[in-house]
Image (cartoon, rainbow, N blue to C red):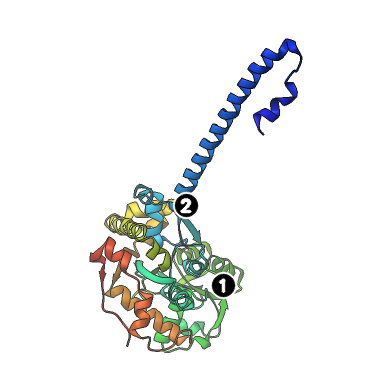
Amino acid sequence: MDPVAYWTPYLFTNANVHRRVFTMKISIERLRWSWRRSLLVMLSVGLSVGASQATAEKIVLATGADPCFGVFYVPHEIGAFKEAGLDTELVTGASGSRQVPFILTGDFHFAMGSGGACMTTHDKDPAKAAMFASGSGYRGYDGVVSRDDIADLAALKGKKVGLALGTGSETFFTTVVENAGHDIKDYDVIPVEAPEMVAALERGDIDAYAAWEPWVSRGVISIPGTHQMLSSEGLWEPVNAICGNRQWAEANPEDATTLFRVMAETAAKMAADPDWAAGVISKVIKLDPDLSRSITKKCSFMTHLNQLVIDGMVNDYNNLVLREVMPKDPSKDWWRGFLYDKPLKAAAPGNVSYSMPGN
Protein backbone atom coordinates (compact mmCIF):
# COMPACT_ATOMS: atom_id res chain seq x y z
CA MET A 1 0.00 0.00 0.00
CA ASP A 2 1.11 3.58 -0.79
CA PRO A 3 2.03 5.38 2.52
CA VAL A 4 0.11 8.53 1.45
CA ALA A 5 -3.08 6.58 0.93
CA TYR A 6 -2.55 5.00 4.34
CA TRP A 7 -2.11 8.34 6.10
CA THR A 8 -4.79 10.49 4.25
CA PRO A 9 -7.69 9.90 6.71
CA TYR A 10 -5.60 11.47 9.47
CA LEU A 11 -4.91 14.87 7.72
CA PHE A 12 -6.71 17.80 9.45
CA THR A 13 -7.98 20.93 7.63
CA ASN A 14 -8.71 23.65 10.31
CA ALA A 15 -6.38 26.67 10.56
CA ASN A 16 -4.98 25.68 13.92
CA VAL A 17 -3.45 22.58 12.57
CA HIS A 18 -2.24 23.67 9.13
CA ARG A 19 1.38 23.79 10.21
CA ARG A 20 1.15 20.28 11.61
CA VAL A 21 -0.53 19.10 8.41
CA PHE A 22 2.19 20.72 6.30
CA THR A 23 4.87 19.09 8.43
CA MET A 24 3.08 15.78 8.20
CA LYS A 25 2.89 16.12 4.40
CA ILE A 26 6.65 16.63 4.24
CA SER A 27 7.14 13.59 6.45
CA ILE A 28 4.77 11.59 4.28
CA GLU A 29 6.62 12.57 1.10
CA ARG A 30 9.86 11.47 2.76
CA LEU A 31 8.15 8.23 3.78
CA ARG A 32 6.88 7.77 0.22
CA TRP A 33 10.39 8.14 -1.19
CA SER A 34 11.87 5.90 1.49
CA TRP A 35 9.24 3.24 0.76
CA ARG A 36 9.87 3.44 -2.99
CA ARG A 37 13.63 3.25 -2.51
CA SER A 38 13.23 0.20 -0.26
CA LEU A 39 10.99 -1.41 -2.84
CA LEU A 40 13.56 -0.78 -5.59
CA VAL A 41 16.30 -2.26 -3.42
CA MET A 42 14.20 -5.34 -2.66
CA LEU A 43 13.37 -5.81 -6.36
CA SER A 44 17.02 -5.39 -7.29
CA VAL A 45 18.11 -7.96 -4.72
CA GLY A 46 15.35 -10.33 -5.79
CA LEU A 47 16.34 -10.09 -9.43
CA SER A 48 19.99 -10.59 -8.50
CA VAL A 49 19.19 -13.69 -6.43
CA GLY A 50 16.93 -15.00 -9.18
CA ALA A 51 19.65 -14.55 -11.77
CA SER A 52 22.14 -16.29 -9.50
CA GLN A 53 19.77 -19.21 -8.98
CA ALA A 54 19.10 -19.44 -12.69
CA THR A 55 22.79 -19.78 -13.56
CA ALA A 56 23.60 -22.12 -10.66
CA GLU A 57 21.51 -25.06 -11.87
CA LYS A 58 21.14 -28.01 -9.52
CA ILE A 59 22.62 -31.16 -11.07
CA VAL A 60 20.49 -34.19 -10.23
CA LEU A 61 22.30 -37.54 -9.97
CA ALA A 62 20.11 -40.63 -9.71
CA THR A 63 20.87 -44.29 -9.16
CA GLY A 64 19.98 -47.35 -7.09
CA ALA A 65 20.72 -48.33 -3.50
CA ASP A 66 23.79 -50.29 -4.56
CA PRO A 67 27.27 -50.01 -2.98
CA CYS A 68 28.97 -50.17 -6.39
CA PHE A 69 27.32 -46.87 -7.35
CA GLY A 70 29.58 -45.12 -4.85
CA VAL A 71 31.12 -42.66 -7.32
CA PHE A 72 27.82 -40.77 -7.09
CA TYR A 73 27.32 -41.27 -3.35
CA VAL A 74 30.75 -40.46 -1.96
CA PRO A 75 31.63 -37.11 -3.63
CA HIS A 76 28.12 -35.88 -2.88
CA GLU A 77 28.21 -37.01 0.76
CA ILE A 78 31.71 -35.67 1.57
CA GLY A 79 30.99 -32.32 -0.11
CA ALA A 80 33.51 -32.72 -2.96
CA PHE A 81 31.00 -31.58 -5.58
CA LYS A 82 30.08 -28.57 -3.46
CA GLU A 83 33.72 -27.60 -2.93
CA ALA A 84 34.16 -27.63 -6.71
CA GLY A 85 31.27 -25.18 -7.08
CA LEU A 86 28.59 -27.67 -8.13
CA ASP A 87 25.14 -27.87 -6.58
CA THR A 88 24.20 -31.56 -6.74
CA GLU A 89 21.17 -33.52 -5.60
CA LEU A 90 21.39 -37.29 -5.07
CA VAL A 91 18.31 -39.45 -5.74
CA THR A 92 18.35 -43.18 -4.92
CA GLY A 93 15.85 -45.90 -5.72
CA ALA A 94 15.59 -49.67 -5.87
CA SER A 95 17.37 -49.90 -9.23
CA GLY A 96 19.76 -47.62 -11.05
CA SER A 97 18.53 -48.89 -14.41
CA ARG A 98 14.98 -47.79 -13.55
CA GLN A 99 16.24 -44.21 -13.15
CA VAL A 100 17.97 -43.95 -16.53
CA PRO A 101 14.89 -43.24 -18.75
CA PHE A 102 14.06 -40.19 -16.63
CA ILE A 103 17.00 -38.42 -18.28
CA LEU A 104 14.72 -37.98 -21.29
CA THR A 105 12.00 -36.29 -19.23
CA GLY A 106 14.48 -33.87 -17.68
CA ASP A 107 14.02 -35.20 -14.14
CA PHE A 108 17.66 -36.25 -13.87
CA HIS A 109 20.88 -35.01 -15.46
CA PHE A 110 22.79 -38.27 -14.90
CA ALA A 111 21.82 -41.78 -13.85
CA MET A 112 23.96 -44.83 -13.20
CA GLY A 113 22.67 -48.27 -14.15
CA SER A 114 23.17 -51.11 -16.60
CA GLY A 115 24.61 -50.57 -20.04
CA GLY A 116 21.44 -52.00 -21.53
CA ALA A 117 19.26 -49.39 -19.81
CA CYS A 118 21.45 -46.60 -21.20
CA MET A 119 21.37 -48.13 -24.70
CA THR A 120 17.59 -48.42 -24.88
CA THR A 121 17.22 -44.89 -23.49
CA HIS A 122 19.72 -43.57 -26.04
CA ASP A 123 17.74 -45.22 -28.82
CA LYS A 124 14.59 -43.34 -27.78
CA ASP A 125 16.37 -39.98 -28.19
CA PRO A 126 19.93 -40.33 -29.57
CA ALA A 127 20.54 -36.58 -29.40
CA LYS A 128 19.79 -36.39 -25.69
CA ALA A 129 20.89 -39.56 -23.86
CA ALA A 130 24.41 -40.98 -24.07
CA MET A 131 26.95 -42.94 -22.06
CA PHE A 132 29.64 -40.71 -20.53
CA ALA A 133 31.66 -43.28 -18.54
CA SER A 134 31.44 -46.32 -16.33
CA GLY A 135 31.39 -45.80 -12.59
CA SER A 136 32.30 -49.32 -11.49
CA GLY A 137 33.19 -52.85 -12.44
CA TYR A 138 31.99 -55.94 -10.58
CA ARG A 139 33.56 -59.19 -9.37
CA GLY A 140 31.11 -61.87 -8.28
CA TYR A 141 28.58 -59.15 -7.52
CA ASP A 142 25.47 -60.82 -8.92
CA GLY A 143 23.97 -64.10 -7.87
CA VAL A 144 21.00 -66.44 -7.84
CA VAL A 145 19.40 -67.03 -4.45
CA SER A 146 17.16 -70.11 -4.19
CA ARG A 147 15.61 -72.56 -1.76
CA ASP A 148 18.11 -75.07 -0.36
CA ASP A 149 16.54 -77.95 -2.33
CA ILE A 150 17.44 -76.29 -5.66
CA ALA A 151 21.09 -77.06 -6.33
CA ASP A 152 21.74 -75.67 -9.83
CA LEU A 153 20.28 -74.21 -13.02
CA ALA A 154 19.11 -77.63 -14.20
CA ALA A 155 17.13 -78.14 -10.97
CA LEU A 156 15.67 -74.65 -11.36
CA LYS A 157 14.09 -75.43 -14.76
CA GLY A 158 10.32 -75.04 -14.77
CA LYS A 159 10.36 -73.15 -11.48
CA LYS A 160 9.53 -69.51 -10.72
CA VAL A 161 12.51 -67.17 -11.00
CA GLY A 162 12.18 -63.52 -9.97
CA LEU A 163 13.90 -61.10 -12.37
CA ALA A 164 13.90 -57.30 -12.51
CA LEU A 165 13.29 -57.00 -16.25
CA GLY A 166 15.31 -54.41 -18.13
CA THR A 167 18.07 -54.36 -15.48
CA GLY A 168 21.30 -56.21 -14.74
CA SER A 169 19.18 -58.90 -13.06
CA GLU A 170 17.72 -59.99 -16.40
CA THR A 171 21.00 -59.52 -18.29
CA PHE A 172 22.95 -61.62 -15.78
CA PHE A 173 20.45 -64.49 -15.64
CA THR A 174 20.02 -64.55 -19.43
CA THR A 175 23.80 -64.63 -19.89
CA VAL A 176 24.48 -67.51 -17.48
CA VAL A 177 21.52 -69.51 -18.81
CA GLU A 178 22.73 -69.14 -22.41
CA ASN A 179 26.31 -69.98 -21.39
CA ALA A 180 25.04 -73.15 -19.70
CA GLY A 181 23.31 -74.23 -22.91
CA HIS A 182 19.81 -73.63 -21.57
CA ASP A 183 16.99 -71.46 -22.89
CA ILE A 184 15.43 -68.66 -20.87
CA LYS A 185 12.05 -70.15 -21.85
CA ASP A 186 12.92 -73.18 -19.70
CA TYR A 187 12.26 -71.02 -16.63
CA ASP A 188 9.05 -69.44 -15.35
CA VAL A 189 10.19 -65.81 -15.20
CA ILE A 190 8.29 -63.65 -12.71
CA PRO A 191 8.83 -59.86 -13.05
CA VAL A 192 9.71 -58.49 -9.60
CA GLU A 193 11.83 -55.57 -8.38
CA ALA A 194 14.99 -56.19 -6.37
CA PRO A 195 13.77 -55.22 -2.86
CA GLU A 196 10.57 -57.21 -3.31
CA MET A 197 12.51 -60.32 -4.41
CA VAL A 198 13.54 -61.07 -0.85
CA ALA A 199 9.96 -60.84 0.45
CA ALA A 200 8.60 -62.81 -2.52
CA LEU A 201 11.03 -65.70 -1.90
CA GLU A 202 10.24 -65.68 1.80
CA ARG A 203 6.48 -65.87 1.05
CA GLY A 204 7.00 -68.71 -1.42
CA ASP A 205 5.74 -66.68 -4.39
CA ILE A 206 8.97 -67.49 -6.24
CA ASP A 207 11.50 -70.32 -5.94
CA ALA A 208 14.58 -68.23 -6.68
CA TYR A 209 15.69 -64.82 -7.85
CA ALA A 210 18.64 -63.29 -9.70
CA ALA A 211 19.89 -59.97 -8.39
CA TRP A 212 22.88 -57.87 -7.44
CA GLU A 213 24.25 -56.89 -4.05
CA PRO A 214 23.11 -56.08 -1.42
CA TRP A 215 19.97 -58.12 -2.28
CA VAL A 216 21.93 -61.37 -2.71
CA SER A 217 23.45 -61.16 0.77
CA ARG A 218 20.27 -59.80 2.35
CA GLY A 219 18.23 -62.70 1.01
CA VAL A 220 20.56 -65.40 2.28
CA ILE A 221 20.95 -63.68 5.66
CA SER A 222 17.24 -63.04 6.27
CA ILE A 223 15.50 -66.12 4.82
CA PRO A 224 16.08 -69.51 6.50
CA GLY A 225 16.41 -72.46 4.14
CA THR A 226 17.97 -70.49 1.29
CA HIS A 227 21.43 -70.29 -0.21
CA GLN A 228 23.32 -68.55 -2.99
CA MET A 229 22.90 -71.14 -5.70
CA LEU A 230 25.07 -69.35 -8.24
CA SER A 231 27.60 -66.50 -8.26
CA SER A 232 28.47 -64.38 -11.29
CA GLU A 233 32.18 -64.69 -10.51
CA GLY A 234 33.96 -66.06 -13.54
CA LEU A 235 30.69 -66.18 -15.49
CA TRP A 236 29.67 -62.56 -15.91
CA GLU A 237 31.76 -59.59 -14.84
CA PRO A 238 29.89 -56.47 -15.99
CA VAL A 239 30.55 -52.76 -15.77
CA ASN A 240 27.87 -50.15 -15.21
CA ALA A 241 27.08 -47.07 -17.27
CA ILE A 242 26.93 -43.43 -16.26
CA CYS A 243 24.20 -42.32 -18.63
CA GLY A 244 23.60 -38.61 -19.02
CA ASN A 245 21.94 -35.70 -20.76
CA ARG A 246 24.24 -34.92 -23.67
CA GLN A 247 22.43 -31.67 -24.51
CA TRP A 248 22.93 -30.37 -20.98
CA ALA A 249 26.64 -31.30 -21.09
CA GLU A 250 27.12 -29.50 -24.41
CA ALA A 251 25.36 -26.41 -23.04
CA ASN A 252 27.34 -26.53 -19.76
CA PRO A 253 30.80 -27.87 -20.72
CA GLU A 254 32.65 -26.42 -17.70
CA ASP A 255 30.20 -27.90 -15.18
CA ALA A 256 30.22 -31.25 -16.99
CA THR A 257 34.03 -31.35 -16.95
CA THR A 258 34.14 -30.38 -13.27
CA LEU A 259 31.58 -33.06 -12.41
CA PHE A 260 33.64 -35.81 -14.02
CA ARG A 261 36.91 -34.47 -12.65
CA VAL A 262 35.52 -34.70 -9.11
CA MET A 263 34.14 -38.19 -9.74
CA ALA A 264 37.42 -39.39 -11.23
CA GLU A 265 39.46 -37.99 -8.31
CA THR A 266 37.05 -39.43 -5.73
CA ALA A 267 36.95 -42.83 -7.47
CA ALA A 268 40.76 -43.01 -7.26
CA LYS A 269 40.59 -42.29 -3.51
CA MET A 270 37.89 -44.92 -3.07
CA ALA A 271 39.94 -47.52 -4.93
CA ALA A 272 42.96 -46.71 -2.76
CA ASP A 273 41.00 -46.89 0.51
CA PRO A 274 37.97 -49.20 0.07
CA ASP A 275 37.27 -49.36 3.82
CA TRP A 276 36.85 -45.58 3.92
CA ALA A 277 34.63 -45.75 0.84
CA ALA A 278 32.55 -48.52 2.42
CA GLY A 279 32.00 -46.39 5.54
CA VAL A 280 30.67 -43.44 3.53
CA ILE A 281 28.50 -45.70 1.36
CA SER A 282 27.11 -47.40 4.46
CA LYS A 283 25.94 -44.04 5.77
CA VAL A 284 24.33 -42.95 2.49
CA ILE A 285 22.28 -46.09 1.78
CA LYS A 286 21.75 -47.13 5.41
CA LEU A 287 23.63 -50.41 5.02
CA ASP A 288 25.23 -52.32 7.91
CA PRO A 289 28.91 -51.22 8.00
CA ASP A 290 30.30 -54.78 8.05
CA LEU A 291 28.05 -55.81 5.16
CA SER A 292 29.04 -52.66 3.28
CA ARG A 293 32.75 -53.49 3.67
CA SER A 294 32.13 -57.06 2.54
CA ILE A 295 30.18 -56.00 -0.56
CA THR A 296 32.43 -53.14 -1.67
CA LYS A 297 35.31 -55.61 -1.96
CA LYS A 298 33.45 -56.91 -5.03
CA CYS A 299 33.41 -53.43 -6.63
CA SER A 300 36.16 -51.79 -8.66
CA PHE A 301 35.42 -48.07 -8.45
CA MET A 302 36.36 -46.05 -11.53
CA THR A 303 35.29 -43.27 -13.87
CA HIS A 304 36.54 -44.68 -17.16
CA LEU A 305 35.84 -45.30 -20.81
CA ASN A 306 38.55 -47.87 -21.50
CA GLN A 307 38.61 -51.12 -23.44
CA LEU A 308 37.35 -53.13 -20.45
CA VAL A 309 34.30 -50.86 -20.29
CA ILE A 310 33.69 -50.99 -24.04
CA ASP A 311 33.93 -54.80 -24.07
CA GLY A 312 31.33 -54.85 -21.28
CA MET A 313 29.03 -52.58 -23.28
CA VAL A 314 29.37 -54.82 -26.36
CA ASN A 315 28.37 -57.78 -24.18
CA ASP A 316 25.36 -55.84 -22.88
CA TYR A 317 24.35 -54.95 -26.43
CA ASN A 318 24.61 -58.58 -27.53
CA ASN A 319 22.31 -59.57 -24.66
CA LEU A 320 19.75 -57.05 -25.89
CA VAL A 321 20.00 -58.65 -29.33
CA LEU A 322 19.34 -62.09 -27.79
CA ARG A 323 16.18 -60.68 -26.19
CA GLU A 324 15.23 -59.04 -29.52
CA VAL A 325 15.35 -55.58 -27.96
CA MET A 326 18.05 -54.17 -30.28
CA PRO A 327 18.97 -54.96 -33.92
CA LYS A 328 22.06 -56.97 -34.75
CA ASP A 329 25.42 -55.54 -35.86
CA PRO A 330 25.32 -51.88 -34.78
CA SER A 331 27.48 -49.56 -36.87
CA LYS A 332 30.42 -47.49 -35.70
CA ASP A 333 28.21 -44.43 -36.16
CA TRP A 334 25.71 -45.87 -33.67
CA TRP A 335 28.48 -46.41 -31.13
CA ARG A 336 29.86 -42.90 -31.76
CA GLY A 337 26.45 -41.49 -30.93
CA PHE A 338 26.10 -43.65 -27.83
CA LEU A 339 29.58 -42.98 -26.37
CA TYR A 340 30.06 -39.33 -25.42
CA ASP A 341 33.54 -38.95 -23.93
CA LYS A 342 34.15 -35.17 -24.22
CA PRO A 343 33.70 -34.25 -20.52
CA LEU A 344 35.77 -37.22 -19.30
CA LYS A 345 38.53 -36.55 -21.84
CA ALA A 346 38.74 -32.96 -20.63
CA ALA A 347 38.58 -33.96 -16.95
CA ALA A 348 40.79 -37.09 -16.88
CA PRO A 349 42.29 -37.85 -20.31
CA GLY A 350 44.17 -40.86 -18.96
CA ASN A 351 40.83 -42.54 -18.18
CA VAL A 352 39.77 -42.61 -21.86
CA SER A 353 41.34 -45.21 -24.16
CA TYR A 354 39.41 -47.57 -26.41
CA SER A 355 38.81 -48.76 -29.95
CA MET A 356 35.42 -47.86 -31.37
CA PRO A 357 33.30 -51.00 -31.75
CA GLY A 358 30.84 -51.61 -34.57
CA ASN A 359 30.94 -52.31 -38.28
Q: Foreground: 29 or 51?
A: 29
- Residue at the location (38% across, 48% down)? 82
Instruction: State which quarter of the image contains the N terminus.
Output: top right
Measured along the vertical axis of the image, is residue 1 above or below residue 175? above
Identify which amino acid the numbered label 1 is placed on.
Answer: Val
Position of residue 346 measured from the top left corner of the image (x, y, whole percent):
27, 63
Position of residue 135 measured from the top left corner of the image (x, y, whole percent):
36, 65
Position of residue 198 measured from the top left corner of the image (x, y, whole percent):
54, 67
Task: Give left or right: position of 93 versus 181.
Answer: right
What label does residue 54 carry, if any?
2
- Residue at the location (35% across, 47% down)? 83
Measured along the vertical axis of the image, is residue 264 above or below residue 87? below
Dot 2: within a 10 Å radius of its alpha carbon, few (fewer than 14), some, or many (20 or more) residues?
few
Callout 2: SS: helix
What label does residue 192 carry, if any?
1
Residue 287 seen anywhere in this rendered image of the structure: no
Residue sticking out furthest to the top:
16
- Residue at the location (56% across, 28% down)? 34
Callout 1: SS: loop
Instruction: State which quarter of the image contains the C terminus.
Output: bottom left
Mark 2 or mark 1, earlier in chain: 2
- Residue at the location (45% across, 47% down)? 52
Marks 2 and 1: which is nearer the front?
A: 2
The count of marks equals 2
Position of residue 78 measured from the top left corner of the image (x, y, whole percent):
38, 48
Dot 1: within a 10 Å radius of its alpha carbon, few (fewer than 14), some, or many (20 or more) residues?
some
Q: Foreground: 123 or 137?
A: 123
Q: Foreground: 105 or 3?
A: 3
Residues under labels 2 and 1: Cα distance?
40 Å
